[in-house]
């Protein structure tokens, strides 16, 4: 009986020690809150999720992505970020283009990011509120069973008068990279000439589809002979269908050049997870991340000197359209309004 009481006393003492340790000792790492970053992105999930996975493996920071649908794409996300301005939910905006990123800066949505990035001149906002890196080119995808390369337009300006314009397609210029292309032409040609160009395109009977993916699909299926898309759409389709090829417009001395639209990334003003956001920006702007984007066919014109273009781009030389992105944003409102009036209203 005495032994039983002795063991009971020892058990009670041990229990008391365990209870006191639970109360006074610091919590273990197992209860530590997980580091996260909320990234709004217009980049297709098939591409962006691979970058997110690499970043998570490298840093241990969990990415919570928010995507958007093809039709509204960048415009939808940008409008959402503006609506959330007083109560930001996102930390970072990774944009597959740049125009709406510049629009967000104009609306006071962005903040200066403390990010070190080895980028060329013109790819960093003077105020540090956005950064740009490698991108995709705007090209013509065509079906060789329906049209030959020699029959294609040589410049974008001749599209409205092309004899086979009714067999051509573009993505709705209200959205995505097609809207960026419109603003670039407004900047280059002036408002009047650019508006007339787009009005002429519609009057000539060009097919205006939901997005670049739809244009690609129509050409792939032979419903259209050719159309304007981004290089990622063109290469994806060309891999699956040997009857498809791509061509570059406005090449050569004195010509406009092909529009290359860079990716962009920005920190949100009042970002809930700023350190994690800046860590993500550091990664996405690195040569390592750009190389991965090239390898998975998202980026075709890299900006880091030690990152080479994809092999499938071949020996195609490219005359690039010179664009001042900061000036270009000034054309966004007028070009967007005109595109709505011409193609939607």
Image (cartoon, helix red, strand yellow):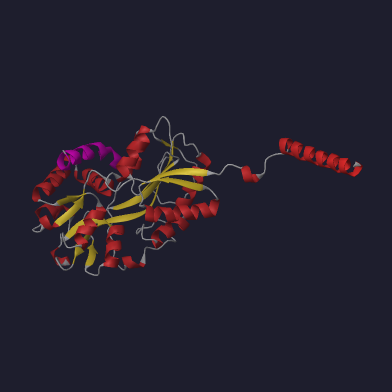
Magenta part, dominant SS: helix
Residue sitting farthest toward the front: 1
Q: How many marks?
A: 0
The residue range painted magenta reads 326-344
**Do we see residue 36 in this rendering?**
yes
The quadrant of the picture occupied by the N terminus is: top right
Q: Quadrant of residue 289?
A: bottom left
Q: Give yes or no for residue 324 being in the magenta stretch.
A: no
Q: Give the image location of residue 193, x and y in percent.
A: 15, 44
Q: Give the image location of residue 297, x and y in percent.
A: 36, 60
Instruction: Name the one closer to the observer, 49 or 20.
Output: 20
Residue displayed at 72% across by 35% down: 23
Residue displayed at 31% across by 58% down: 232
Q: Give the image location of residue 241, x and y in percent.
A: 25, 67
Residue displayed at 27% across by 65% down: 238
Instruction: Name the one closer to the observer, 190 or 150.
Output: 150
Relative to 270, is 72 above or below?
below
Left or right of 318? Residue 132 is: right
């Amino acid at each position: 009986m005495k032994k039983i009481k002795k063991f009971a006393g020892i058990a009670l003492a041990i229990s008391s020690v365990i209870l006191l340790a639970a109360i006074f000792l610091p919590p273990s790492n197992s209860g530590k809150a997980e580091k996260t970053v909320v990234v709004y992105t217009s980049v297709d999930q098939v591409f962006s999720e691979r970058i997110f996975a690499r970043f998570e493996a490298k840093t241990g920071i969990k990415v919570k992505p928010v995507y958007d649908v093809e039709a509204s794409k960048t415009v939808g996300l940008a409008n959402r970020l503006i609506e959330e301005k007083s109560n930001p939910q996102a930390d970072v905006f990774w944009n597959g283009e740049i125009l709406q990123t510049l629009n967000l800066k104009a609306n006071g949505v962005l903040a200066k990011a403390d990010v070190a990035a080895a980028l060329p001149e013109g790819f960093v906002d003077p105020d540090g509120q956005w950064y740009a890196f490698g991108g995709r080119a705007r090209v013509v995808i065509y079906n060789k069973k329906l049209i030959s390369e020699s029959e294609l337009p040589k410049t974008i300006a001749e599209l409205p008068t092309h004899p086979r314009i009714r067999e051509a397609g573009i993505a709705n210029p209200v959205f995505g990279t097609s809207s960026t292309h419109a603003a670039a032409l407004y900047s280059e040609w002036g408002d009047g000439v650019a508006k007339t160009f787009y009005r002429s395109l519609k009057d000539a009977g060009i097919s205006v589809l939901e997005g670049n993916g739809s244009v690609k699909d129509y050409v792939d299926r032979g419903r259209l002979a050719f159309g304007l898309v981004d290089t990622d759409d063109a290469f994806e389709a060309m891999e699956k269908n040997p009857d498809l090829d791509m061509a570059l417009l406005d090449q050569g001395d004195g010509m406009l050049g092909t529009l290359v639209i860079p990716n962009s990334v920005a920190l949100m003003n009042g970002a809930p997870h700023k350190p994690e956001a800046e860590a993500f920006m550091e990664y996405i702007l690195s040569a390592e991340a750009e190389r991965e984007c090239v390898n998975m066919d998202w980026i075709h014109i890299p900006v880091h000197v030690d990152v080479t273009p994809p092999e499938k781009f071949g020996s195609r030389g490219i005359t690039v359209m010179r664009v001042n992105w900061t000036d270009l944003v000034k054309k966004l409102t007028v070009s967007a309004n005109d595109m709505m009036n011409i193609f939607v209203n």
